[in-house]
Amino acid sequence: MWRTDRGRATSGLLLITAVALPSIGVGDAPPPGVASTAEEASDVEARASDAFERGKAFYKQEKYSDAAEAFREAQRLNPTWRLLFNIGQSEAAAKRFGLALEAFEAYLAKGGDEVSAERQQMVQNEVRRIREMVGLIDIKAPQGALIQIDGVDRGESPLPGAIPVTAGVIHTVSAILEGEMLPDKEVKVIGGATAEVSWIPENPPVKPAPIAMTPAQQTAPSAPPKRNTQRGVGIATAGAGGLVVVGGILTGAMALVKDGKLKKDCDDGACGAALRGTLESRDSLATATNVLLAVGGVAVAAGVVLFVIGVRKERQTAARFRPKLSGAGAVWEF
């Protein structure tokens, strides 16, 4: 009912003009912070009505973003949940679906039972339609920073939650901290998904506090060099060779199976054309088995040699670095 084509927009405008702007009468208690005297109340009412009329005029001219801002001004001057409906319609027509969704949901929540059943149903249908075209932006900024999305104020950080925006469109997210503009960030959100925008750097790793050392510990030389890696290389090489050997065993088993089939199906050792593929496959597997077993065996042998050499070197290194106690504490003897 609230599409942005000309015919639909006119239908929506009829609903907007039907929403009466509550007035602040001389005898009424004005909202806190709006007006405190009859003269001030009259001035606020006049400015709110003017903003409301401008909103209707903008909507007729299909200037939907301007209409939404005018209705927001009227709502700020004379707070009423009824104007949230006008704002939601204008934002939906402007294809700013995130703002429209917020306005319609606030309209239903704040209007409650005062919203007619027919109007509730219409707005709920529109909310369901809009949600399919909305994604979320989770914004993290320094505390107190004013957040804007596409030039519209969305509150101060920390925000109460992720902000709904139109999906599939690039949005400009801004943050103003103590009058200083932080670098803008652009983000495009997929429908139903949440994108994150942050001006807060990741926490650097916390360095542990230095441990107090005794004078003897402070003068002690460094520990001996780390163990060589030759033993580890030997283990890895032997392990890889073992896997190759296992592969050779498997291919050998497959070759034996095919050989048994050939012996069973061939007459007096003569195999027909139908078994030629099996014969070739057996020979290939046999060749692969010989190669794998040979390569794997060499790798296992090389790994064992490297392991033994590595163990010997570690023992020699350990023998060179022997701890010796002195008056200053533990030292290493070379």
Image (spheres, grey):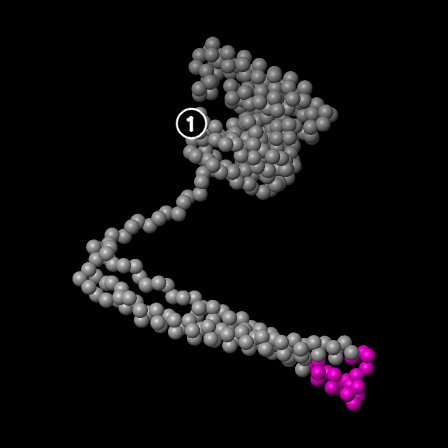
Percent across and percent down for residue 70 are 58, 20
Name the quarter where the N terminus is drawn. Answer: top right
Taking depth in this image into account, of 77 and 269 the one nearest to the observer is: 269
Observer-nearest of 69 and 188: 188
Instruction: Return the residue found at the far bottom.
Output: 268
x then y, percent, for residue 77: 51, 19
**In the rendered image, which residue does mark 1 sit on?**
178
Q: Is residue 263 magenta?
A: yes
Q: Position of residue 204 (x, y in %)?
A: 41, 45
Residue 18 visible? The answer is no
What range of the chain is rendered magenta?
A: 257-275
**Foreground residue, 326 or 74?**
326
Residue 286 showing in the rendered view: yes
Expressed as whole percent of the image width and height from the top left, the position of residue 175 reads 49, 31
330 left or right, relative to 62: left
Q: Residue sitting at 62 percent across and 37 percent down? A: 167
Name the residue: 57% across, 26% down: 84
Q: Toward which corner of the image does residue 326 lie, by quadrant?
A: bottom left
Q: Is residue 248 left or right of residue 314?
A: right
Q: Quadrant of residue 111?
A: top right
Q: What quarter of the picture does the C terminus occupy?
A: bottom left
* Mark 1 nearby-residue class (10 Å; few <14, some 14–19, many ≥20): few
Q: Which residue, as the protein is rendered here, is positioned at the far top? A: 39
On the picture, is 96 further left or further right than 279? left
Element type where label 1 sits in the image = loop
Q: Residue at x 50, y 11 (%)?
A: 43
Dominant secondary structure (helix, strand or loop) of the stretch shown in magenta: helix
Say what amino acid the circle numbered 1 marks. Glu
